[in-house]
Image: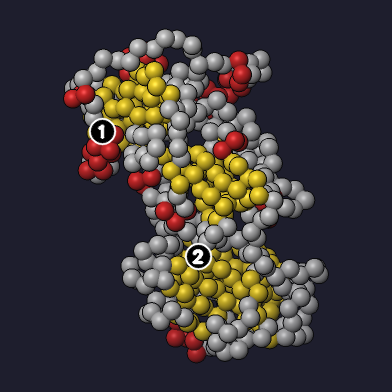
């Protein structure tokens, strides 16, 4: 944990005891001051996009503005009023149709009293540095090789308020359009909802109030248009952390950023008003729902791909079918001696692609209480494009077979590397009888969603 995040934890714990109990958010007011815009020559204004270009060219090193006489200007699109941001503001270059944004670290809390949402600011670059911290472009002061917070004593000299408070128009995007170029921008995503397993059960999840939530609560938002997913991240110090997630569908407005490790895109709310979930009609897919009990000690079918090639699988009755006419297919991959079914559409040039991996027939005639589980590793994740199905009436052609979708949540992985294998299920399939087949459909496009998946340890058990 770097020093900023350690300080963040300590500072908030102190504030929780000494301030939160006696001061309500409404007690903080942005100072009602007459503001004179700074007298800055236009030749001294540097484009924010240019700063981001310098960061990109630095190849991981920080860019130092020690002797610069330049300023950058932008509009504040974050707010720490609800406690979901801490000792930082996020600014973007325009109030509408932004093209560049940056996170600014400041050793001050709270910040919304000076830099409220929509406030235009000028930032003096002299003595500052910029780089990539936690996966996003960040501005502050250099300490060692890390960009850290601007000291509180120089806040007003470095970050100068303009008299302008603009109406911010969110940039409308989709999950599939997430990119590093869009981080630190205020975005809007339409037609989204939380997964039914998180909000419709007997124990619906809160934003970040579960015992397992340490620093942040991470919840999957899913697109009603494409089924793609993205992570909504909420601080465990946010004042809305204990609210239950909404069950409806609607839109998200907030900041696109990345997680602490910088490897997964995250969506962050300024406050709960950024979720306008006003459509009572959910877009849940039709999934297989078996009412009977499931789970037993008898293993009916299992596959861990050890010692096998894709030809061995096909000879054993597996099907590996590209229905869109391309050459992309599943292969058997391996790492550190572990083997698994693998697929990735990256650099395939196929747009669109749809590839099915189908098990041999599995006889469930003589068993009861069956359930299925498997493990998925999601890598270089840029959209959820894997779906699991079952059928008891396979026609020999995946396109003419009537499939039932399994109620299996495919895990989200990092956007810039390899994730961990995560267990999926067990999923109750006890209401399906006879000879069945399980299928994994991979459907995306290049360019477009090309998440790489590894599938392992498929097991059906019962009595």
SS type, badge 1: loop
Percent across and percent down for residue 199 are: 69, 50
Cα separation, mark 2 vs mark 1, equals 37 Å
Crowd band around label 2 with a 10 angstrom C-alpha radius: few (<14), some (14–19), many (20+): many
> Given the current orientation, which residue lies at the most extreme right position?
292
Q: Point out the frontmost of discs 2 and 1.
A: 1
Tell me: residue 348, above or below residue 148. below
Most foreground residue, 11 or 131: 131
User: Residue tagged by mark 1?
Assistant: 47
Q: Residue at x 30, y 15 (%)?
A: 38
Q: Residue at x 36, y 64 (%)?
A: 447
Give the quarter of the image for residue 53.
top left
Give the quarter of the image for residue 275.
top right
Q: Residue at x 58, y 20 (%)?
A: 15
- Left or right, 279 with respect to 59, comes to right
- For the N terminus, give its image quadrant: top left
- For the C terminus, give its image quadrant: bottom right
Total numbered badges shown on the rendered structure: 2
Label placed on residue 385: 2
Percent across and percent down for residue 266 are: 48, 45
Give the quarter of the image for residue 20.
top right
- Left or right, 152 with respect to 130, comes to right
Question: Quick check: can you spot residue 162?
Answer: yes
Percent across and percent down for residue 72 are: 28, 27
């Amino acid at each position: 944990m770097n020093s900023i995040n350690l300080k963040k934890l300590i500072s908030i714990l102190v504030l929780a005891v000494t301030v939160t109990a006696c001061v309500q958010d409404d007690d903080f007011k942005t100072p009602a001051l007459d503001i004179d815009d700074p007298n800055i020559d236009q030749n001294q204004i540097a484009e924010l996009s240019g700063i981001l270009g310098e960061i990109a060219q630095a190849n991981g090193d920080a860019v130092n503005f020690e002797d610069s006489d330049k300023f950058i200007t932008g509009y504040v699109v974050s707010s720490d009023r609800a406690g979901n941001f801490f000792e930082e503001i996020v600014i973007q270059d325009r109030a509408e149709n932004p093209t560049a944004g940056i996170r600014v670290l400041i050793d001050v809390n709270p910040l919304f009293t000076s830099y409220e949402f929509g406030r235009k600011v000028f930032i003096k670059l002299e003595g500052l540095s910029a780089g990539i911290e936690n996966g996003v472009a960040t501005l502050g002061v250099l300490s060692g090789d890390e960009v850290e917070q601007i000291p509180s004593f120089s806040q007003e000299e470095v970050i100068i308020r303009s008299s302008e408070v603009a109406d911010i128009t969110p940039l409308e995007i989709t999950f599939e359009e997430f990119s590093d170029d869009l981080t630190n921008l205020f975005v809007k995503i339409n037609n989204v909802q939380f997964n039914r397993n998180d909000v419709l059960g007997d124990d619906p999840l809160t934003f970040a109030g579960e015992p397992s939530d340490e620093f942040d609560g991470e919840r999957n938002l899913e697109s009603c248009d494409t089924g793609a997913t993205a992570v909504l991240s909420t601080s465990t110090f946010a004042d809305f952390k204990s609210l239950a997630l909404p069950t409806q569908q609607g839109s998200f407005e907030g900041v696109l950023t990345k997680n602490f490790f910088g490897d997964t895109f995250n969506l962050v709310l300024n406050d709960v008003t950024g979720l306008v979930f006003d459509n009572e009609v959910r877009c849940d897919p039709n999934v297989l729902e078996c009412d009977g009990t499931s789970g037993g000690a008898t293993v009916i079918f299992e596959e861990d791909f050890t010692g096998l090639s894709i030809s061995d699988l096909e000879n054993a009755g597996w099907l590996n079918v590209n229905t869109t006419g391309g050459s992309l297919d599943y292969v058997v991959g391996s790492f550190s001696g572990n083997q698994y079914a693998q697929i990735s559409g990256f650099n395939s040039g196929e747009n669109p692609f749809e590839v099915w991996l189908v098990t041999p027939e599995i006889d469930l005639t003589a068993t009861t209480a069956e359930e299925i589980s498997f493990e998925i590793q999601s890598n270089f994740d840029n959209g959820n494009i894997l779906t699991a199905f079952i059928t008891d009436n396979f026609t020999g052609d995946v396109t003419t077979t009537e499939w039932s979708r399994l109620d299996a949540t495919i895990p989200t992985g990092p956007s810039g590397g390899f994730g961990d294998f995560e267990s999926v299920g067990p999923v109750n399939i006890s209401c399906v009888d006879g000879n069945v087949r399980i299928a994994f459909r991979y459907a995306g496009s290049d360019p477009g969603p090309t998440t790489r998946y590894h599938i392992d340890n498929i097991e059906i058990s019962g009595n």
